Image (tube, helix red, strand yellow):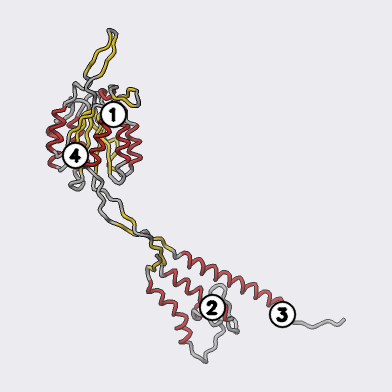
């Protein structure tokens, strides 16, 4: 749809007519009769001469003026209504990268992978489905640190997740400090939009703040905390004396993770395998859907340069025509002087 930003400026098209109408009938000027008044007589392409401007040139000048006025009115193309994808969620992913995450008790396509590799695979798919969300990433071991602040740039977030490595944050597990840091990053965001997804495979063994105190602060800040305990219940461990079945998740504190989730209105999930982990993040996706606010806008493209450019082109063409015509006329005129008959 075409529209004008300043339609009232189109009244300026009448200016040449008004100037012509106000000019005294008996008044004679050396400048040509122009549709935009005598004040244009000094512009390029207009020369002072006693003869009137040919009608077609007058029409061209009038068209140039009209195009300039149209450009001033700022024509625009208004596109179709576009729904604006605004989400109602700020979601912080908190991932344990302590050395225990190196345990290879996850299976992908028939081969064993460690827990962090499984988390990266599943989180990549989870992040890709949160288009429009603001997501952040906190990694923790002995200490937590922000790998990626809250951002809409999900591609960069995925890259930063892939760059994380086991043991980068120390060899212990500071669950309380990690939740505290996530709370600090989310507390200034709007209520009902603050969500933390915490994944770990152990118990709290380090940190300055206890998990229970961190959970209390998170609950007071209206943060929902979803906790995930990752690790198989049993696996075959091979050694010099043969094979034996062990529990690789013996250090997982499920009671703590359950308590943390319940106190903040979230849920606790247990991921014993890669398919279970995928299902958990899919469930969280459904529990925390992307909420569109229903706002919309119409994209606007300016078109003023088209009439302005056409006006400049017509003016230049008329200027060049008059220059060439003037030279041809001058070349045909006889020069003064006597003729020598010999």
Kindly report the distance in space between the C-alpha atoms of the residues bearing marks 2 and 3: 28 Å
* Label 2 vs 3, first from the N-terminus: 2
For the N terminus, the quadrant is bottom left
What residue sits right under mark 3 in the picture? 333
- Depth check, front residue: 250 or 245: 245
Give the SS element for disc 2: helix
Q: Which mark is residue 164?
A: none
Q: Which mark is residue 183?
A: 4
* Label 4 vs 1, first from the N-terminus: 4
Give the SS element for disc 4: helix
Kindly report the distance in space between the C-alpha atoms of the residues bearing marks 4 and 1: 28 Å
Quarter where residue 185 is shown: top left
Kindly report the distance in space between the C-alpha atoms of the residues bearing marks 1 and 3: 97 Å
* Label 1 vs 2, first from the N-terminus: 2
The residue at 44%/80% (across/down) is 14
* Label 3 vs 4, first from the N-terminus: 4
Please tell me whether residue 148 is drawn above or below residue 244 in the rendered image: below
Q: For the view shown, which residue lies furthest in the right direction?
A: 342
Q: Is residue 176 found left or right of 306 in the rendered image?
A: left
Which dot, 3 or 4, sits closer to the camera? Answer: 4
Kindly report the distance in space between the C-alpha atoms of the residues bearing marks 3 and 4: 92 Å
What residue sits right under mark 1 in the picture? 274
What residue sits right under mark 2 in the picture? 59
Which dot, 2 or 3, sits closer to the camera? Answer: 2
* Label 1 vs 3, first from the N-terminus: 1
The residue at 34%/56% (across/down) is 82
Which dot, 1 or 2, sits closer to the camera? Answer: 1
């Amino acid at each position: 749809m075409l529209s004008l930003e300043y339609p009232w400026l189109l009244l300026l098209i009448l200016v040449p007519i008004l100037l012509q109408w106000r000019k005294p009938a008996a008044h004679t000027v050396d400048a040509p009769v122009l549709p935009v008044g005598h004040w244009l007589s000094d512009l390029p392409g207009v020369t002072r001469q006693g003869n009137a401007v040919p009608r077609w040139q007058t029409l061209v000048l009038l068209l140039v003026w009209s195009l300039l006025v149209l450009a001033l009115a700022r024509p625009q193309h208004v596109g179709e209504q576009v729904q604006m994808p605004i989400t109602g969620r700020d979601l912080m992913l908190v991932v344990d990268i302590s050395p225990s995450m190196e345990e290879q008790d996850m299976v992908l396509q028939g081969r064993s992978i460690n827990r962090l590799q499984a988390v990266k695979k599943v989180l990549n798919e989870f992040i890709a489905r949160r288009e429009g969300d603001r997501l952040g990433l906190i990694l923790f071991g002995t200490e937590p640190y922000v790998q990626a602040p809250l951002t809409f740039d999900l591609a960069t977030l995925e890259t930063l997740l892939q760059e994380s490595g086991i043991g980068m944050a120390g060899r212990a597990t500071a669950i309380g400090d990690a939740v505290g840091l996530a709370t600090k990053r989310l507390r200034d965001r709007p209520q009902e939009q603050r969500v933390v997804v915490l994944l770990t495979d152990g118990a709290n063994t380090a940190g300055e703040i206890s998990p229970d105190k961190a959970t209390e602060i998170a609950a007071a800040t209206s943060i929902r905390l979803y906790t995930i305990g990752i690790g198989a219940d049993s696996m075959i461990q091979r050694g010099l004396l043969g094979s034996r079945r062990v529990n690789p998740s013996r250090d997982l504190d499920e009671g703590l993770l359950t308590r943390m989730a319940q106190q903040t209105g979230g849920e606790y999930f247990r991921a014993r395998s890669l398919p279970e982990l995928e299902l958990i993040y899919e469930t969280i996706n459904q529990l925390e859907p992307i909420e569109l606010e229903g706002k919309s806008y119409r994209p606007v493209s300016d078109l003023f340069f088209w009439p302005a450019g056409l006006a400049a082109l017509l003016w230049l063409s008329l200027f060049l025509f008059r220059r060439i015509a003037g030279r041809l006329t001058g070349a045909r005129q006889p020069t003064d002087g006597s003729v020598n008959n010999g």
